[in-house]
Image: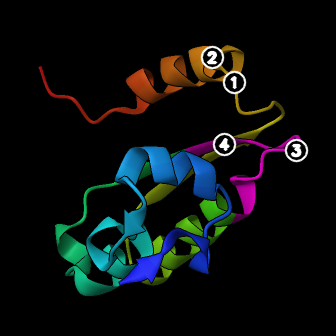
Amino acid sequence: MRTLGDRLERAELVDRVFGGEFTADDDLFELLAATEPGSVPPLYIACGTEEDRLMPANGRLADAARARGVAVTTDFRPGVHEWGLWDDVIQDVIVWLPLRA
């Protein structure tokens, strides 16, 4: 098992979410590599581009998913990691969702 400091950009945040231990079951890159590409639903990956420390990881995840044949919509727009950005993004996610009536 890896500790939080091994490769995480936001270790303090992940520590609160995962309780201090980050395993392969928590790693989106590991999960993606271990999953049959046809079984992964389309992904919508959004992130603010202005000083958001999660931007590089989001870009890498989008690239890794595409390399595995997963349909990915990216929404990298100006903004920082805060509610104002996410209030706008969620409207686009709702429109994008492949919901059927």
Residue 49: say if magenta: yes
Question: Which of the two labelled residues, at mark 3 and mark 2, occupies the earlier sequence position?
Answer: 3
Q: Which mark is residue 47?
A: 4
Pointers 1 and 4 in contact (C-beta within 8 Å): no
Marks 4 and 3 sit apart, C-alpha to C-alpha, by 10 Å
In percent of width and height, residue 74 lies at 59, 50
Between disc 3 and disc 2, the foreground one is 3
Q: Residue at x 47, y 58 (%)?
A: 72
Residue 72: say if magenta: no
Marks 2 and 4 sit apart, C-alpha to C-alpha, by 11 Å
Type of the residue with mark 2: Asp
**Which residue is identified by label 1?**
82
**Which residue is identified by label 3?**
51
Pointers 4 and 3 in contact (C-beta within 8 Å): no
Marks 1 and 2 sit apart, C-alpha to C-alpha, by 11 Å
Type of the residue with mark 3: Glu
Q: Residue at x 26, y 56 (%)?
A: 41
Pointers 3 and 2 in contact (C-beta within 8 Å): no
